[in-house]
Image: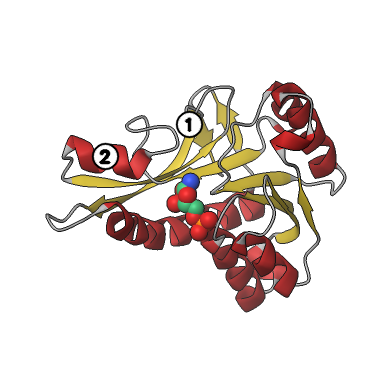
Amino acid sequence: VRLVVLVSGSGTNLQALLDAIAAEGVARYGAEVVAVGADRDGIEGLARAERAGIPTYVCRVKDHADRAEWDAALAEATAAHEPDVVVSAGFMKILGPRFLARFGGRCVNTHPALLPSFPGAHGVRDALAHGVKVTGCTVHFVDDGVDTGPIIAQGVVEVRDEDDESALHERIKEVERSLLVEVVGRLARHGYRIEGRKVRIP
Ligand code: GRF
């Protein structure tokens, strides 16, 4: 299975995938990262791809007339690598209708909260502010909403009294990285079916 991974920041989820594939080998893991795309330059996520010898591409919103043009350009640049599955791992833009027209149903996102609670760009901060006792992360298929697609797997993380946003997010990311590696490998090796809001992995 050919994966394209989309990043916007440090890329530790991407790194977890690269490490798992390097450790197990493409045949056993069932997938390989064929390219890494980003919405901005100069981020550690791109450097991680370059260090692994993986092609990268950048689609910046400001280089396009508007969000719709950017969405189309991102879809084109992604399609050039002929992915079977797109993994959005810390990608901080909403994937639009043009992108989903090509990759809907085979685009997986990881979110650092227990959806449907705390969707959006500040899931960790919002959960902390709300005073939840447990939070976690969610791996789901992307649909045309924001963090609303069919849920594949979730991991739970306890919130500690002394937590601030970054401490809690780092602890969530530890669970998130292993959950993403496990889910992507399972989808790659066994395939999947999406039935309404249910995801079936044989
Ligand atoms: C992850 O927790 C992701 O869910 C959130 O931002 C973080 C990105 O981390 N959107 P990284 O770039 O994979 O290190």
Residue 171's place in the image compared with 120, above or below, is below
Question: Dot 2 surroundings within 10 Å: few (below 14), some, or many (20 or more)?
Answer: many
Q: What separation in Å lies between label 2 and label 1 (alpha carbons)? A: 15 Å
**Among all residues in the image, which is located at the extreme bottom?**
23
> For the residue labelled by badge 1, is the local secondary structure a helix, a strand or a loop?
loop
- As drawn, is 90 to the left or to the right of 165? right
Q: Using the image as rendered, state which of residue 194 and residue 79 is in the foreground.
A: 79
- Residue at horizontal 72%, vertical 41%? 60
**Among all residues in the image, which is located at the extreme left?**
161
Residue, disc 2: 127
The percent position of residue 22, horizontal first and vertical second, equals 66, 75
The percent position of residue 24, horizontal first and vertical second, equals 62, 74
Q: Say whether residue 128 is visible.
A: yes
Give amino acid for label 1: Asp
Residue 74 — which label? none
Give amino acid for label 2: Ala
Q: Earlier in the sequence, mark 2 or mark 1?
A: 2
Residue, disc 1: 147
